[in-house]
Image (cartoon, helix red, strand yellow):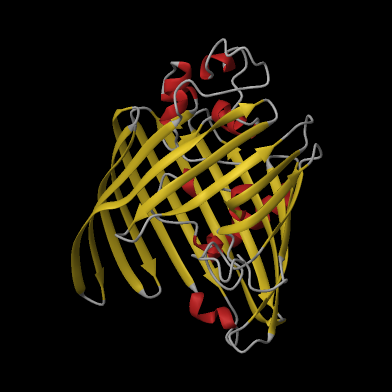
């Protein structure tokens, strides 16, 4: 399985702020979800541009605000921009000849908000109720962009949003390389500075989005630094350096480097690739891997393929994270904001298979 990713990565090297679905935007501007989504939650080209430019809808932005307030410096949403997303799963899985049947309904419920506070500022946040646990904010940030091409995003976000946002994938199967180890590229608290040169750099605490301790989000001064550079041919280069203490107080230094790439094969089909590797303290504790995916959307149908692979040397801390998986999903959309899905995922080591039948809808 890793050989597939390796060949794709070789081919790439030789040739070369995101948000979940918010139906509130459709309500604000009186437009279809299809304006921004190829097949929800996957964005089309216009949706990607709309998100990247701070949710400003040229020629229609004033429709979002209360008219005639008498104050040109005040933008109040005429309708509070709220949206909801529900995910309900029925799951059958087997591992070591043991079968398990489960109704994960609901799996997750999200209350979302976001929008442009003006041409120089936008916000996005959601509260999630997931797997029966207490609700919490995951994404919760404000983006300031007073000058063309420059911007600062401050709050809670995922580092992987600079490459492939996990919240916008079609598959239930995750982008696993982003989630492993001591320096995952998932939710953190910090900021990102974006520049006109397609270069984004940022700093985060590095300890996730857990509870504050004695009024501090981070118990020490060690931080994680990262950056992403856009390259020709829809490619990108990612790098990270961070420090954190282990359970005994010893210092751990983490290094990461990755390449991402996407290609619209046709108007309906997209091929995308992430290769990522790194180590902690010494190259003995290294890992490497990534994912390869294909999305095909032709409303009311969508098909997605996702291959994950993670490898590590024998004596590496990351040896236990080794895995290879493949997932295939078919989605049918009876409505723009409702999808019925069937996904089959197989893990090769250890061998396990999972079938998911579900409903994913937003309003």
The image quadrant of residue 132 is bottom left
Q: How far across and how far down the image is residue 323, in percent? A: 47, 71
Q: What is the quadrant of the C terminus in the image?
A: top left
Q: Is residue 203 left or right of residue 212?
A: right
Mark count: 0
**Residue at point 65%, 67% (across, down):** 277
Farthest-out residue, right: 197
Of 106 and 303, which appears nearest the observer? 106
**Residue at point 46%, 45% (across, down):** 126
Q: Is residue 356 left or right of residue 205?
A: left
* Residue 165 visible in rendering: no
The image quadrant of residue 209 is bottom right
Q: How far across and how far down the image is residue 253, in percent? A: 72, 76
Q: Is residue 274 left or right of residue 88?
A: right
Farthest-out residue, front: 70
Residue 126, compared with residue 3, is above or below; it is: above
Q: How far across and how far down the image is residue 91, in percent? A: 23, 58
Residue 98, compared with residue 129, is above or below; it is: below
The image quadrant of residue 246 is bottom right
* Residue 53 visible in rendering: yes
Residue 36, compared with residue 154, is above or below; it is: above
Of 114 and 196, which appears nearest the observer? 114
Farthest-out residue, top: 68
Of 31 and 232, which appears nearest the observer? 31
**Residue at point 34%, 72% (across, down):** 351
Q: Is residue 173 left or right of residue 284?
A: left
């Amino acid at each position: 399985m890793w050989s597939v990713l390796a060949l794709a990565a070789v081919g790439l090297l030789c040739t070369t702020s995101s948000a979940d679905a918010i139906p509130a935007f459709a309500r604000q501007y009186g437009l279809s979800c299809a304006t921004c989504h190829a097949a929800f939650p996957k964005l089309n080209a216009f949706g990607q541009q709309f998100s990247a430019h701070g949710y400003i809808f040229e020629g229609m932005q004033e429709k979002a605000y209360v008219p005639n307030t008498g104050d040109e410096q005040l933008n109040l949403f005429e309708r509070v921009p709220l949206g909801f997303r529900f995910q309900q799963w029925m799951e059958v899985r087997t591992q070591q000849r043991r079968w398990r049947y489960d109704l994960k309904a609901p799996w997750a419920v999200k209350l979302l908000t976001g929008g442009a506070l003006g041409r120089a500022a936008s916000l996005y946040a959601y509260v999630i109720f997931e797997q029966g646990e207490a609700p919490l904010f995951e994404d919760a940030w404000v983006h300031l962009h007073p000058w063309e091409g420059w911007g600062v995003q401050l709050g809670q976000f995922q580092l992987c949003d600079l490459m492939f946002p996990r919240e916008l994938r079609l598959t239930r199967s995750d982008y696993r390389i982003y989630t492993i180890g001591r320096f995952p590229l998932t939710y953190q608290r910090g900021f990102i500075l974006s520049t006109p040169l397609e270069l984004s750099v940022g700093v985060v605490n590095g300890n996730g989005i857990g509870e504050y301790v004695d009024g501090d989000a981070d118990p020490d001064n060690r931080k994680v630094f990262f950056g992403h550079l856009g390259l020709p041919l829809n490619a990108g280069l990612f790098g990270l350096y961070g420090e954190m203490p282990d359970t005994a107080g010893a210092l751990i230094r983490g290094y990461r480097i990755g390449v991402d790439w996407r290609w619209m094969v046709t108007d309906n089909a997209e091929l995308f690739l992430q290769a990522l590797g790194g180590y902690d303290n010494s190259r003995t504790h290294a890992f490497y891997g990534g994912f390869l995916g294909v999305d095909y959307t032709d409303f009311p149908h969508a098909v997605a393929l996702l291959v994950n692979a993670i490898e590590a040397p024998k004596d590496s801390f990351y040896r236990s994270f080794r895995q290879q998986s493949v997932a295939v999903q078919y989605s049918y959309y009876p409505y723009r904001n409702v999808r019925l899905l069937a996904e089959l995922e197989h893990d090769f080591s250890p061998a396990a298979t999972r079938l998911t039948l579900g409903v994913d809808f937003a309003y």
